Image (cartoon, rainbow, N blue to C red):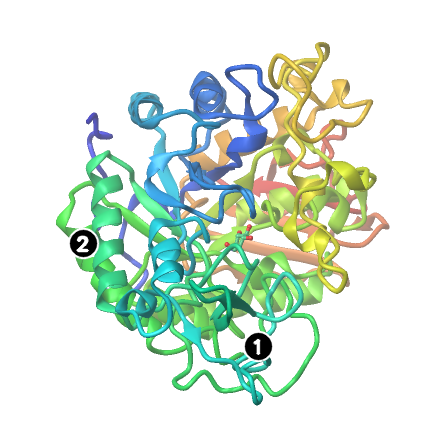
Amino acid sequence: MTQLSPATTTTPTGGAPGAETGWWRDAVIYQVYPRSFADGNGDGMGDLAGIRQRLPYLAELGVDAVWLSPFYASPQADAGYDVSDYRVIDPMFGELADAEALIRDAHGLGLRVIVDLVPNHSSDQHAWFRRALCEGPGSPLRDRYHFRPGKGAHGEEPPNDWESVFGGPAWTRTSNPDGTPGEWYLHLFAPEQPDFNWECPAVRDEFRTVLRFWLDMGVDGFRIDVAHGMVKAEGLPDMGRGGQLELLGSQVLPFFDQDGVHEIYRDWRAILEEYGGDRIGVAEAWTPSADRTALYLRPDELHQAFNFHYLGADWDAGQLRRVIDESLDAMRPVGAATTWVLSNHDVVRHRTRLGGGLDRAHAATLLMLALPGSAYVYQGEELGLPEVEDLPDEVRQDPSFFKADGQKGLRDGCRVPLPWTAGGASYGFGGGGAWLPQPRGWADLSVEAQTGDPESTLELYRRALRVRHDHPDLGAGDAVQWLPAPEGVLAFRRGSFVCTANTTEDAVDLPAAPGRALLSSRTTESAGTLLPGDTTVWWTTS
Ligand code: NOJ
């Protein structure tokens, strides 16, 4: 398998925590959602062949790595986050040879590849779960999941009061092999996603070999789904309160962010270290605070974690400054690179979520890309795609939509397939109709329409990533120096680089130009001291 060469190293350059180098510390990592990126075989569903064809686009965009959401064998009850075989590609996405070719081509273009690993739960169609069901209560094969007798005189009530993240109880009752009502099993997400029992040695062994399988194929790392969920509080105590759980939430719960989970990451880190080339682990960990997130990033655990506290901040100077400071302060003692993210496949796209249209989205992006550390870009944000808010009910697929008390299927609107060309049945996504309908009017948002247009979102991202790559004071780092700024404006310095972001809707006059303007999120206006509303400007003093 071709490896990126030469690999950057993790050799400490200073000795102070945070001074280490490593490719992920300043990487811009692009999230590909395989269903919706590019459809190579024209069946309306994105696939690995489609992604492979479009890799040059990503290289040209200027990202360093690609994270692929799951493409494994799956009944697709949760868009692939319900895996029935961790070593097989779902036929709708291709086959193992396609994955190998994709990794090889990406490396050839200088792009690293991170794959999604889903270790908290499998599909209910996974061979282990099916066998456990067949074997009935008392079978050691049931130890691989959380099976429990119900409460009540006849076991008719769930074993505890845990709620599923998608809505409804986190337990589903099984039938015994003879058809009588049987034990219950735990699923923190959909009923089709039974939780593994990580106290069971077979589960730990299985995932060690799954890691090796993909490392042997050449992947550069893993994005670890529900990384905070594998270990549950001993005895599975009640939550003690009702109410819908938040997706990406920060609540303290007996099944999330338990201390025991860190032992798993110490084990995995040793495996990653065995392989050369700086393979990384990225935690999708929903924790109550940046300090709790930092625990996943101690030097013998994972390399990065998504910064959901940043993603959750409003477009408000005070809130942003607080989250930025807390994030940097929390990561510094463990020497981990901070990450920044505005959009992903689980949240409303930031052009819509931040409430200020394209101008604000552009300003938010330039602010994010100016911060020290690594940044995640979700496919389509470089095109300025809005959330699709009017999808008809009959096309929706988010499992939470089908729960009366769930989260209303809010995730389909950010998963609509990308427009590549201004014309064609699915704007060049594939041959036929896309699996989720694309809105009329997306022609102007297509890659084709935006390429070469200096005022487009796409060209802004391209320029920003180029400047970020070339400027010696952008990228990795663990601190910013805040500068005095008018109310509602964030201004900070990093060496010879200065960023000013106006989070208000009104123009403000800066006391003086902080340097020579490098880039403005208002693509049409040259930056003087007047900073328009919802605008970020990058400056340099060198
Ligand atoms: C987080 C993933 O990002 C989300 O899409 C998925 O539904 C849950 N984990 C469950 O796997």
Q: Tell me the residue at 30%/23% (across/down).
A: 97
Q: Nearer the viewer, residue 135 or 512?
A: 135
Screen quadrant of the N terminus: top left
Residue 351 picture quarter: top right
Residue placed at 73% from the left, 56% from the top? 315
Q: If you read the primary sequence from the N terminus, does the residue marked by circle 1 or circle 2 appear first?
A: 1
Crowd around label 2: few <14 · some 14–19 · many ≥20 (10 Å): some
Most extreme residue toward the front is 178
Q: Amino acid at mark 2?
A: Ile
* Above or below, comparing residue 474 to residue 207 in the picture: above
| Side (left or right) of 25 relative to 513 | left
- The residue tagged 1 is 162
Percent position of residue 22, x then y: 28, 47
Tell me the SS state at disc 1: loop
Mark 2 lies on residue: 271
Tell me: residue 369, above or below residue 435: below
Q: Dot 2 lies on which element?
A: helix
Residue 291 visible in this rendered orientation of the protein: yes
The residue at the point 52 percent across, 61 percent down is 481
Query: Between residues 77 and 441, which one lies in front from this camera angle?
Result: 77
Rendered location of residue 343, percent (x, y): 61, 46
Rendered position, 354 above or below 202: above
The one of 65 and 199 positioned closer to us in this rendering: 199
